[in-house]
Image: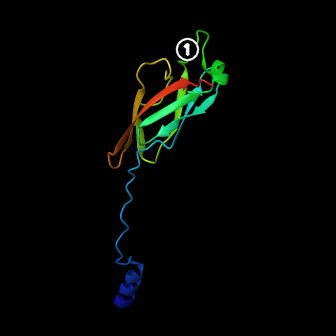
Amino acid sequence: MNILLTAALAALMPGCAKPDAEFLHDDCTVKAIYMVSVLSGAQIPGDIDDEAGTIRFTIPKADRKKWQDDEGFVTRVKLRATIPYDAVITPSLLGQKDLINIEEPVEITVTATQTGRTKTYNMKAAFSRH
């Protein structure tokens, strides 16, 4: 009886293989980002330059009215971004932003929470000349 019990337990025991190394999510780059007009719902993708740490939104001249309020300002935009798993953006992209009527670009930092690795981006929007 003891032999049968020991054999049954041995069959149920896992092997002695080493577990796979845990994958650490250390990617802290913005994969895609869009600026969305609160006034019209129009969207513009951001031009991401990871080396320079910049994100630029270029509003075509023909679409200017979709982005400007009655006084000609573009202060009511929202941002939507795609970032890697286990990464966070600070400050948050929640709420309305102003990326065009500003002197200095808006700075965001993406942090890979598992490793603490960070990447900082400066964001700005502008109207194209064409």
| Residue at image location 62% in from the left, 26% down from the top | 60
Q: Is residue 49 above or below residue 5?
A: above
The location of residue 76, given as percent across then percent down, is: 55, 20
Quarter location, residue 28: top left
Foreground of the two, 62 or 91: 62
Q: Say whether residue 90 is left or right of residue 83.
A: left
- Say left or right for 75 vs 2: right
Q: Residue furthest right?
A: 62
Amino acid type at circle 1 is Phe
Dot 1, how many residues are within 10 Å of its Cα: few (below 14), some (14-19), or many (20+)? few
| Residue closest to the eye, 17 or 89 | 89
Q: Residue at x 36, y 90 (%)?
A: 3
Q: Is residue 93 above or below residue 68?
A: below
Image quarter in which the N terminus is found: bottom left
Please identify the residue farthest to the left as the structure is shown.
116
Quarter location, residue 53: top left
Left or right of 112? Residue 65 is: right
Q: Nearer the viewer, residue 103 or 18?
A: 103
Q: Which residue is mark 1?
A: 73
